Image: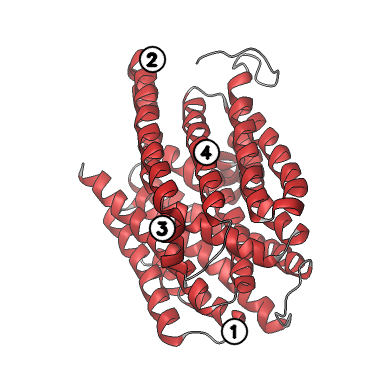
């Protein structure tokens, strides 16, 4: 119970910090600049998705099997491997971000200083996130919470105190406030060993985990690809409105995310003990999630537009419909993420790949056509379509024939 409370507090700090950055953007930046921040954050989410699948999830499984010096040697080798990938991924993400903002109408000056600020943000934010998540695996929950506070606390203080005059200065604040949490990962004494080479770590994390690593681009593309398409097909201001609506619902979605986190830690234990307990746990968590989602829908229908106006000081006629459609998507997202946890538990990773592949194609295609007509609302509908296809793909693919569509089978 204590660990769950600490995890809940940490999730509140992280989600609340990101949410308050969104509020800052809404109050002190134009809607177009909010859209650009949405591009920046979405590009970073691609890096985070890869790191989750390639580094954090495998190490959470592998590290507990080690003890003493072996654990510290593995931790040091993992850190070196992550830094190497962080450099490469930061360059790729910066190039992608610059390319995408050139595709939309923007007054942002594209110069060396701007490129450098974006690249440093991507790099330091990855290290800060590694510092926090590795604390859960190798250290304690309290250490992870401390890192979250050191990241989001100073960031919010500097943003609201300094009030950067340009989008470029805004990115520099985000980057530099990631520095302290990033270097905290070096505060622990680690030992090295020639046996723990980079190739050995990469084999553990990537070769033996190829289906989930291959799925990570699809996991990002289905959810964030529509945002980039929306900016090109409609406008960067439409992206800004879409970003603010999702930020608001992300806070409302914390309870369902905690259920997913609980499922990730408990499903494997239940499956190892008794498959009947495993299935009962799936039904129970699904029921609790449905209750939370239903309560959220009532609040959105009755007060959604008023809450949006109060938080962001933004008036828009399509907000109520936009929030309702996005919340429908969040309900389906909860279902397929929960099913993904159960599929990983039984070793059906190929099913997860097929589901995300279908969802990615569906959401990006739907966004291209619907955003040209309905702007932000069209992107929200496309998100629903993508989530539905992921869920159907996971359900309709048999575990014994993972790449063949078949009739509905319960696992």
Secondary element at image label 2? helix
Mark pair 2, 3: CA separation: 34 Å
Residue underneath mark 1: 166
For disc 4, the neighbor class at 10 Å (few under 14, some 14 to 19, many from 20) is: many
Residue underneath mark 3: 15
Mark sitting earlier along the chain (2/1): 1
Q: Is label 1 in contact with label 3 (beta carbons under 8 Å)? A: no
Q: Position of residue 310 (x, y in %)?
A: 41, 66
- Numbered-mark total: 4
Query: Which of the labelled discs sits on residue 275, or is there none?
Result: 2
Mark sitting earlier along the chain (4/2): 2
Up the image or down, 85 lies above or below 70; here it is below
Q: Is label 2 in contact with label 3 (beta carbons under 8 Å)? A: no
Mark pair 4, 2: CA separation: 24 Å
For disc 2, the neighbor class at 10 Å (few under 14, some 14 to 19, many from 20) is: some
The quarter of the picture where residue 122 lies is: bottom right
Up the image or down, 72 lies above or below 309; here it is above
Relative horizontal placement of residue 24, taking residue 350 as reference (left or right) = left
Residue underneath mark 4: 333
Q: Position of residue 123 (x, y in %)?
A: 57, 67
Mark sitting earlier along the chain (1/3): 3
Mark pair 4, 3: CA separation: 17 Å
Q: Residue at x 34, y 56 (%)?
A: 12
Q: Is residue 327 visible?
A: yes
The quarter of the picture where residue 121 lies is: bottom right
Relative horizontal placement of residue 101, taking residue 219 as reference (left or right) = right
Q: Position of residue 192 (x, y in %)?
A: 46, 56
Up the image or down, 342 lies above or below 21; here it is above
Q: Is label 2 in contact with label 1 (beta carbons under 8 Å)? A: no
Q: Is label 4 in contact with label 2 (beta carbons under 8 Å)? A: no
Mark pair 1, 3: CA separation: 24 Å
Mark sitting earlier along the chain (1/4): 1
């Amino acid at each position: 119970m204590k660990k769950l409370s600490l995890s809940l507090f940490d999730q509140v700090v992280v989600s609340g910090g990101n949410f308050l950055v969104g509020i800052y953007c809404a109050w002190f930046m134009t809607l177009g600049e909010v859209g650009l921040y949405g591009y920046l954050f979405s590009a970073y989410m691609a890096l985070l998705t890869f790191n989750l699948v390639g580094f954090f999830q495998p190490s959470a499984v592998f590290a507990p099997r080690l003890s003493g010096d072996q654990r510290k040697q593995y931790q040091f080798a993992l850190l070196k491997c992550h830094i190497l990938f962080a450099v490469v991924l930061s360059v790729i993400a910066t190039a992608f971000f610059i390319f995408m903002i050139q595709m939309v109408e923007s007054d942002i000056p594209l110069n060396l200083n701007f490129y450098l600020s974006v690249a440093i943000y991507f790099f330091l934010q990855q290290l800060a996130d590694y510092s926090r998540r590795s604390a859960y695996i190798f250290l304690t929950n309290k250490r992870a919470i401390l890192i979250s506070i050191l990241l989001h606390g100073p960031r919010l203080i500097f943003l609201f105190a300094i009030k950067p005059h340009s989008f470029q200065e805004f990115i520099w604040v985000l980057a530099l406030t990631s520095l302290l949490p990033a270097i905290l990962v070096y505060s622990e004494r680690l030992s090295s060993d020639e046996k723990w080479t980079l190739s050995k770590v990469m084999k553990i994390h990537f070769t033996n985990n190829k289906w989930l690593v291959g799925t990570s681009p699809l996991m990002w593309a289905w959810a964030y690809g529509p945002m980039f398409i929306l900016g090109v097909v409609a406008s960067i201001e439409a992206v800004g409105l879409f970003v603010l609506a999702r930020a608001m619902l992300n806070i409302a979605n914390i309870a369902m995310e905690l259920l997913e986190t609980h499922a990730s830690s408990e499903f494997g234990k239940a499956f190892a003990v008794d498959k009947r307990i495993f299935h009962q746990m799936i039904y129970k968590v699904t029921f609790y999630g449905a209750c939370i989602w239903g309560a959220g829908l009532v609040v959105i229908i009755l007060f959604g537009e008023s809450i949006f106006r109060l938080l962001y000081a933004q008036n828009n006629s399509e907000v109520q419909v936009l929030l309702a459609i996005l919340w429908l998507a969040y309900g389906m997202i909860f279902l397929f993420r929960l099913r993904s946890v159960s599929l990983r538990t039984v070793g059906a990773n190929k099913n997860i790949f097929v589901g995300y592949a279908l969802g990615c194609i569906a959401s990006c295609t739907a966004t291209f056509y619907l955003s040209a007509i309905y702007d932000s609302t069209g992107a929200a509908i496309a998100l629903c379509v993508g989530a539905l296809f992921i869920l159907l793909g996971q359900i309709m693919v048999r575990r014994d024939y993972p790449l063949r569509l078949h009739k509905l089978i319960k696992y």
